[in-house]
Amino acid sequence: EVQLVQSGAEVKKTGESLKISCKGSGYRFTTYWIGWVRQTPGKGLEWMGIIYPGDSDARYSPSFQGQVTLSVDKSTSTAFLQWSNLQASDTAIYYCATTRIVVLNNVVAATSFDIWGQGTMVTVSS
Amino acid sequence: EIVLTQSPGTLSLSPGERATLSCRASESVRSNYLAWYQQKSGQAPRLLISGASSRATGIPDRFSGSGSATDFTLTISTLEVEDSAVYYCQQYGSSPLTFGGGTKVEI
């Protein structure tokens, strides 16, 4: 069974750094790209970016470019989402999910998100 | 970016009834690259439909998707109590991919 298991809830202060994880199991980790999605009550679901575990090729939504960094560790089948300078506006639930890609006007983009992790709640306060 | 508008905001129905959820795009969705998700309270979203009409693995056939261009529909033919959830559409025909605001189905 394909499964993604995410790291636990985090409570941080503004300005701190954070790295959350998403571990894949039940499949060859390089078969699918991993996407990240943010969910907030105000903005709903937002696509953040995708990364290919095979070569760490990462593509970001313009809204999140420069704000977060995606990475993977192939040896442990784990993907990561990290921040270097958390803001209160980063308070949200973050989901990882498997996805495939499509090339649109020479731009690599995610397709649907097939298998989701359980989510990681991140709370940032001053 | 493509804006997806879902309606109605909330749908209150009884078990056995039919639910029709709408997702309207601000511009045509290329190749009908549209997906639907179900999110129950406290859970992650679950993929129901991709490519506007293809059910994901393990999804009951009471869920069906239809539509093209700017107008898409998710139909739940015979509602069950377990179908209470928020349903989201998502387009991946244009980057950045975007999600609709959701329709809450109460049973």
Image: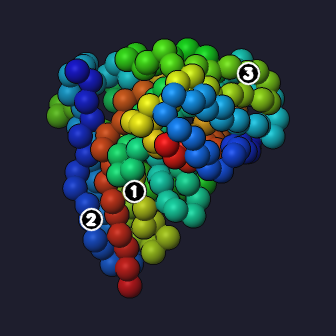
Q: Amino acid at mark 1?
A: Ile
Q: Note whether residue B39 is visible.
A: no
Q: Position of residue B60 (x, y in %)?
A: 43, 18
Camera-nearest residue between B7 and A95: B7
Image mark for residue A93: 1
Camera-nearest residue between B3 and A63: B3
Q: Are marks 3 and 1 in contact (CB under 8 Å)?
A: no
Task: Give the label, 3 or 1, closer to the camera.
Answer: 3
Q: Chain of mark 2?
A: A
Q: Callout 3 environment at 10 Å: few (<14), some (14 to 19), or many (20+)?
A: some
Q: Position of residue B11 (x, y in %)?
A: 61, 45
Q: Note whether residue B55 is visible.
A: yes
Labels 2 and 1: the sequence-earlier one: 2
Q: Position of residue B6 (x, y in %)?
A: 69, 43
**Circle 3 sits in a helix, a strand or a loop, which is it?**
strand
Which residue does the numbered mark 2 point to in the structure image?
Answer: A10
Q: Residue furthest right?
A: B27
Which residue does the numbered mark 3 point to in the structure image?
Answer: B67
Task: Give the label, 2 or 3, closer to the camera.
Answer: 3
The relative height of residue A90 versus residue A32 in the rendered view (above or below) is below
**Circle 2 sits in a helix, a strand or a loop, which is it?**
strand
Q: Chain of mark 3?
A: B
The relative height of residue A13 versus residue A99 in the rendered view (above or below) is below
Q: In the shown orientation, is residue A68 left or right of residue A5?
A: right
Q: Amino acid at mark 2?
A: Glu
